[in-house]
Amino acid sequence: MATIGTFTKSEDGSLTGAIKTLTLNVKVAQLRPVDKDNDKAPDYRIFSGAIEFGAAWKKTSRENNDYLSVKLDDSGFGSGTLSQLRNRHGEVETRCDRGRPTCAVDGGASGAGAP
């Protein structure tokens, strides 16, 4: 997996960082928590300034680790980028599996950075 970004968690629950792919170069990306109006609605919306370019849902792995399932609107990946956000070494990393048509945001759920 290739790292395509890193994030840190703010006191207000948002995550702020940068994402860079072949078609995206977002220097200030923010995952903002939102009030869900139904069970399938995202827990976070992803913005660069006022532009929304993705969403994230809270999930739990089979190993009982919390993470975010992230969908980025990135034309470089065809129908968008599907990722996981997990804590890695105290910061949240966005990682992409180049062997798949979808991508993974690997940054973690325990410790700093994860929701």
Image (tube, helix red, strand yellow):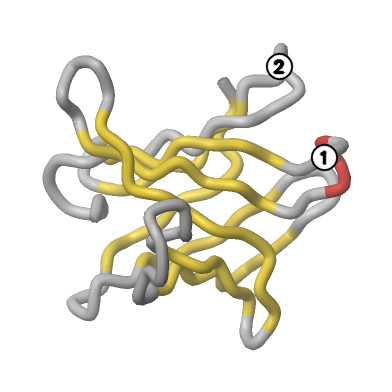
Please provide percent x and percent y for residue 18.
Answer: 55, 60
Name the kind of residue labelled 2 in the image. Answer: Arg
Q: Position of residue 46 (x, y in %)?
A: 55, 66
Give the number of callouts.
2
Q: Is residue 85 left or right of residue 81?
A: left
- Name, please, the residue furthest toward the front: 38
Foreground: disc 2 or disc 1: 1
Sequence-first disc among 2 and 1: 1
Q: Is 41 positioned to the left or the right of 9 in the image?
A: right
Which one is nearer the viewer's eye here, 57 or 93? 57
Return the x and y of residue 34 as percentages of the image width and height. 39, 74
Q: Give left or right: position of 19 versus 31.
A: right
Identified at 71% across, 12% down, the residue is 99
Residue placed under numbered mark 2 in the picture: 100
| Residue ID for mark 1 | 79
| Tag 1: amino acid | Ser
Which residue is pictured at 29% across the width and 48% down the height? 91
Task: Point out which mark residue 18 bears.
Answer: none
Label 1: state its secondary structure. Answer: loop
